[in-house]
Image (cartoon, rainbow, N blue to C red):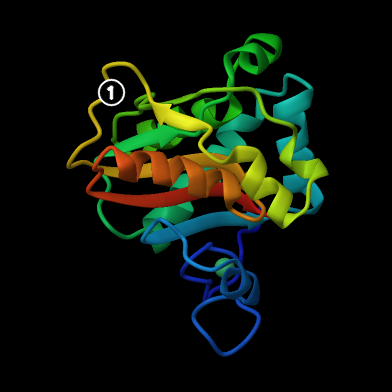
Amino acid sequence: MGTLPTPRCLLCGGGRDGALDICSECLRYGERPWVHAVSACAFRGSVREAVHRLKYQGGTAMVPVLGAAMAADWRRHGRGEPEVIVPVPLYWTRQWGRGYNQAELLACYVGSELGLPCERLLRRRRRTAQQAMLNMDARRTNVRGVFAPAPGAKIAGRRVLLVDDVMTTGATLGEAARALGDAAVAAVSVLTAARG
Ligand SMILES: [Zn+2]
């Protein structure tokens, strides 16, 4: 599985599209509530197929395929020395319907590769519409305030690596990072399998 070329955008881990360290989409989006992001692959071709299988066809065999690319890419490009890996949570009804949270499977795989604990420090307060159906502004509104600390979660002062399957606009990851920030996290980095 071919990973993205370097140099990468510092804010989303995707490809650069100009002379700046930041891609044009991140410039348009504005501030990101994390220090650094790495995305292993572009969201197209076999990667898109693997993510689709993982999310919608029970394809958990895709976890080591995507997870190995993520761990390898983090070793090459990651910064900030995170001490705990945190998956972006699904709402419980969606997780129950799917039987698993694909972000959590990836996070645990990456955690075992990198020798870091994987902890469910966040919960999702409500079910949201599928982000894929919405434009950038609607995506932001859709997920605003949707994440909160999980009961008993120890977040304050810790360096967190937030993991999800795909970053498209970054709205969901941004809300998750904000919820960690509200709970006095020391630093948030982001790792995704693919940049949409
Ligand atoms: Zn970017």
Is 4 displayed left or right of 83 in the figure? right
Specify the quarter for ligand 1.
Answer: bottom right
Where's the C terminus, which quadrant? bottom right
At a point 68% along the width and 29% down the height, the residue shown is 128
- Classify mark 1: residues with Cα within 10 Å, few (<14), some (14-19) or many (20+): some
- x and y percentages locating residue 117 in the rendered image: 29, 29
Give the tally of numbered discs.
Answer: 1
* Residue 88 % position (x, y): 50, 34
The residue lying toward the viewer, choosing from 95 and 27, is 27
The foreground one among 45 and 34 is 34
Q: Give the answer, above or below, for where 116 lies relative to 119.
A: below
User: In the rendered image, which residue does mark 1 sit on?
Assistant: 153
Secondary structure at badge 1 equals: loop
Could you say which quadrant of the image residue 29 lies in? bottom right
> At 76% from the left edge and 30% from the top edge, which residue is drawn?
53
**Disc 1 marks which amino acid?**
Ala
Query: Height in image: 100 above or below 190?
Result: above
Q: Position of residue 28 (x, y in %)?
A: 62, 72
Tell me what residue is drawn at x 37 percent, y 21 percent: 150
Please indicate whether residue 2 sits to the left or right of residue 145 in the image.
Answer: right
What is the x, y in percent for residue 19?
57, 90
